[in-house]
Image: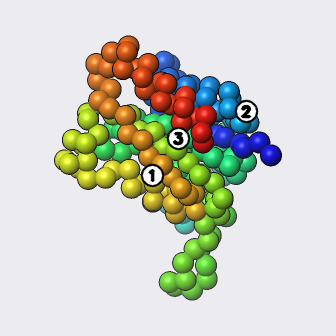
Amino acid sequence: MTKKVLVFLGHPNNEKTLCGSFADAYEEGARKAGYEVKRINLGDLKFDPILHKGYKVIQELEPDLKMAQEAWKWADHIALFYPNWFITMPALLKGFFDRVWLPGFAYHFLPGRYSGWQRLLKGRSADVIITMDANPFIERLLFGDFSNEIKNGIMGFAGISPVRVTKVGPMKGINDERHKIWQAKMKKLGSRC
């Protein structure tokens, strides 16, 4: 059976970005390896990213969000790409998770006050590639491990494991040679997911 890979570009800008070029390279590597691949670009999705009433009233999901949920359920492996903005993901990507990561889709709380939860997306693995303008080592020293939010708080909470995080930086002023090196690394990651 062919592995099913979802490449999800979490950058809100669909024009040419370095983050998008890495998603392209990963997708190319996965396709060349013979995997079945679907691609979603966050910037193409039409939805309200605001969870207006929290989880007290579940908002009706827009068609694009329903399609995205189906793609996440379909996939054996997810490759998520996004830029680090102020030590977190872009607001539109956070809004996507707020709207899509719902009880019955990503998790289910068990009855009882402290009974825990079922992780409904078990059996899937993920690569998370985070681009940033600064050096990842320096950012970690200054701000701690900001990837815990996506790795443990979102994906791990839903049962996705393992989640491998790759931090790419500094992107500011990256030259063509360095960009090509990173693209080759992304293509290789895609071929071995």
* Image vertical order of residue 151 relative to residue 179, above or below: below
Mark 1 vs mark 2: in front:
2
Seen as rendered, the residue at the extreme top is: 176
The tag earlier along the polypeptide, 3 or 2, is 2
The tag earlier along the polypeptide, 3 or 1, is 3
- Who's the residue at 66% across and 40% down the image? 5
Seen as rendered, the residue at the extreme right is: 1
Write down the quadrant of residue 57 in the picture.
Answer: bottom right
Number of marks in picture? 3
Q: Amino acid at mark 2?
A: Gly
Distance between the Cα atoms at labels 3 and 2?
19 Å
Location of residue 143 in the rendering, given as x and y in whole percent from the top left corner: 23, 49
Kindly identify which residue carries mark 2. Answer: 34
Residue 80 is marked as 3
Q: Amino acid at mark 1?
A: Ile
Seen as rendered, the residue at the extreme left is: 142
Location of residue 89 in the rendering, given as x and y in whole percent from the top left corner: 40, 42
| Disc 3 + disc 1, Cβ < 8 Å | yes
- Who's the residue at 77% across and 42% down the image? 2
Write down the quadrant of residue 129 in the picture.
Answer: top left
Distance between the Cα atoms at labels 1 and 2?
28 Å
- Who's the residue at 71% across and 42% down the image? 4
Residue 150 is marked as 1
Left or right for 48, reference 172: right
- Who's the residue at 66% across and 59% down the image? 123
Q: Amino acid at mark 3?
A: Leu
Label 2 secondary element: loop
The tag earlier along the polypeptide, 1 or 2, is 2
